[in-house]
Amino acid sequence: MKTRFFKFVTIALLTIALPIIAKAQANTLLLSDSAFVRENYTKTEVQIPMRDGTKLFTVIYTPKDAGAKNTYPMMLQRTCYSVAPYGANEYKKLVGPSSAAMREKYIVVYQDVRGRWMSEGTFTNMTPHIADKKVKSGKNADVDEASDTYDTIEWLIKNAQNNNGRVGQWGISYPGFYAIAGALCRHPALKASSPQAPIADFFFDDFHHNGAMVLGYFSVFPLFGVQHAAPTSKQWYEFVKPPTKDGYQFMLEAGPLSTLTERYYNNNFFWKEHFDHPNYDEFWQKRNLLPHLTNVKHAIMTVGGWFDAEDLYGPLNIYKTLEKNNPGSYNTIVMGPFGHGDWARNNDPHTMHNHIYFGDSISTFYQQSIEAPFFKHFLKGAGDGKTGLPEAYMFDTGKKLWRTFAEYPVKAAQKRTLYFHSGGKLSFTAPSGVSDSTMSDFVSDPAKPVPHTEDRTTTQWIPRPYMSEDQRFASSRPDVLVFQTDTLTEDITLGGELLAMLNFSTSGTDADWIVKLIDVYPGWTENHPYLPHKNITLSGYQQMVRSEIMRSRFRKSFEKPEALKPHEITPLNFRLQDCLHTFKKGHRIMIHVQSTCFPLFDRNPQTFVENIYKAEAKDYVRQTHRIYHSSKYLSGLQVDVLE
């Protein structure tokens, strides 16, 4: 469904239609989801053999009215998070990607992947894809997630009763990775895949950002770094229980990362893999799925959230790579105003991320008007690609409405640069007539790092709210450079890619750089009625729109880090993930530049060491950093502006 011309259609949220639809459903679908599952589905548990003999535990939910004359397509989810509840008479409260899809009825299949829960085998994080499988069968067969998906589908087609020969798959987060990795199986029965919040490359997503460790994930390493001896339905790993709920203080007092290893993770293989592979070496490169996304002929709909703190790199880059490598295939993307996986939830009719309210029933709209039609078309309908859905369904997080695009990134977008100026000014006009040495500087002290959030109750587990958090706490720090425009006299929509372009120097031999794009609300902004905290005011709120970190050591190569020369002016360009955000008239655009963002990211010692994870206490040194903004040494943020 590709077109070469640009167009977009602005779609207002269905504030009137959705309540009517919801009321109609309430009248016709009286059963709760859990009751509907029990009344309409039969559960079967099976062990499916893979080509190397390993058996994977699989659960099949079949509609009770399925028969020879009433066959159903299959929906598959493969997961490392357990297909529980286990037991033939224990049912999930909902099967399939949503209530809407469940009530449409499919044969829904869940599978524990290798080495997890009730499946045999050994677990591998981000299983490397084997493009050329030389050994096709037997104990030593070449296996990966694609081959396991193929073998599973092949078994299901032959053994799952009353299926119509069509299979779709979906998954969120790690199951999203299994969905896109499984898409490479190229089984002829596989007609539609929806990888949602999928991981694409562990060095740039989830546990790393541009190679910097996401220390905010410290507590969840046991989930991914402990093997179990045999299939089990019981949790076999234990989470760390720090002596304080304040993650910032806990991590700061822990000191160098090696201390955490000694105290908590000596036997955690995933933590050890990080320490043994601090750079983008073959170990991580083999786990990059993007180079393998070729010859994908079935329909793909990739889904993500603009405020997904865990997997934003994956959805955007998987879609773009599929688009580049598979011209003519059905490949679409959906990006909503969601945190991680929130599009699959209907807990609150008022769609929020942290303090920001985006509208009502947005996840319901996605499930009923985007996801359900996609699967229905390819698994039950004509399957010819004429779904009526656009190439790109994207939510403008500033105007708070859906927009559709016939192509993404939008070719008609105008590339412009927001330049840094003296006095904290930010402008689309480059500085001129100023000294080459014009700069802004600050002292970065690893002993007093800039916190990534003002809410320390969120620093102990996977960080999420910070993605749209008020940045006033950071703007007041002396180690954060702040640049902002004058009050906008008209709306400005940034829709597409963002590129930080810095010219910097430092007194040290290494440094991290964090760049934040921020929407500054006017002082007259009123609070909306759904604010979760009474002590929050949206008057003057500095909402983060996007941010990213980059290690100077990787400025030339992620494979071979290189020390900086003290006080030498050095160029550094790096991408922030895309955005679609309208900065409204009366607002301002702000950009922060800083060198610590803790404990979201591990601290750079600012003294170059070969393995940054093995830095010693003596290596952590205060340094002076400078950002230059002259006519010769420009610094700023390149953006895509949509008219």
Image (tube, rainbow, N blue to C red):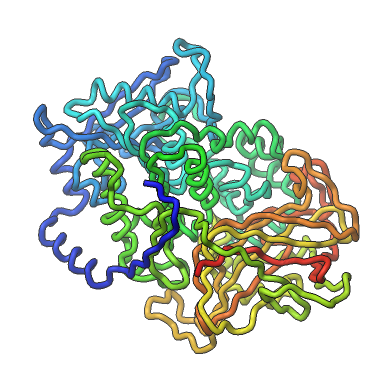
> Residue 539 in the image: x percent, y percent?
52, 84
Please say if 638 is above or below 194. Answer: below
- Residue 601 placed where, x, y %? 66, 55
From this viewpoint, which residue is outermost toward the bottom? 524
Q: Quadrant of residue 520?
A: bottom right
Q: Residue at x 67, y 70 (%)?
A: 592
Q: Residue at x 64, y 43 (%)?
A: 264
- Would you say residue 442 is visible in this rendering? no
Image quarter of residue 414? bottom right
Please provide percent x and percent y for residue 187: 36, 26
334 displayed left or right of 44: right
Q: How many marks?
A: 0
Depth check, front residue: 461 or 242? 461
224 relative position to 138: left or right: right
Front residue of this view, candidates 3 and 127: 3
User: Where 526 falls versus 348 (above or below)?
Assistant: below
For image coordinates 42% across by 25% down, the residue present is: 148
Q: Nearer the viewer, residue 356 or 297?
A: 297
Q: Is residue 120 visible?
A: yes
Q: Looking at the image, which residue sits at the far front? A: 5
| Image side of residue 248 versus residue 391, left or right | right
x%, y% of residue 154?
32, 22
